[in-house]
Image: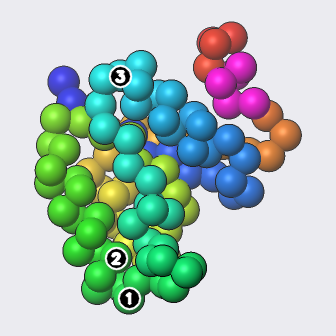
Amino acid sequence: MRDRMYNTDCKSYGQSTLGAELASVLGVTYISLDSLFWKPNWVESTPEEFQAKVQQRLAENEGGWVVDGNYTSRLGGLVVERRTDAICTYAGCDPLTQLSES
């Protein structure tokens, strides 16, 4: 079974930490949308560039991935339609603690 998780949140609280840790536990690739969106000196990628980068990374990791970032308005269903699970973290909760208590 392929694990394809989309980790999104409202305030960026622990999102990257959770995404990287979850990918490590599952043995899949961690993909940060921020790292694909931002060019050097905080220059934004064009919508076309960004979508192409994301499509390439997803295609390279068909065996599974954890993607983090809240770029649905720029990507549409590109990530959402390919995911098997979604996690939404909120400010004020420690997602790693919440997972370990489940």
| Cα distance between the residues tagged 2 and 3 | 26 Å
Q: Is residue 20 above or below residue 75?
A: above
Specify the amino acid type for callout 2: Phe
Numbered range of the magenta stretch: 94-98
Horizontal and vertical percent position of residue 37: 44, 72
Q: Local crowd at mark 2 within 10 Å, few (<14), some, or many (≥20)?
A: some
Look at mark 1 in the image and give the residue it sits on: 46
Question: Looking at the image, which is closer to me, 19 or 80?
Answer: 19
Magenta-span inclusion, residue 4: no
> Is the Cβ of the residue at disc 1 closer than 8 Å to that at disc 2?
yes
| Cα distance between the residues tagged 3 and 1 | 32 Å
Which residue occupies the extreme top position in the image? 101
Q: Earlier in the sequence, mark 3 or mark 1?
A: 3
**Disc assigned to residue 26:** 3
Which color scheme did the rendering employ for the protein? Answer: rainbow
Magenta-span inclusion, residue 97: yes
Question: Looking at the image, which is closer to me, 65 or 73?
Answer: 65
Look at mark 2 in the image and give the residue it sits on: 50
Horizontal and vertical percent position of residue 74: 44, 78
> Is the Cβ of the residue at disc 3 closer than 8 Å to that at disc 1?
no
Residue 88 in view, yes or no: no
What residue lies at 34% left-to-right and 76% top-to-bottom? 50
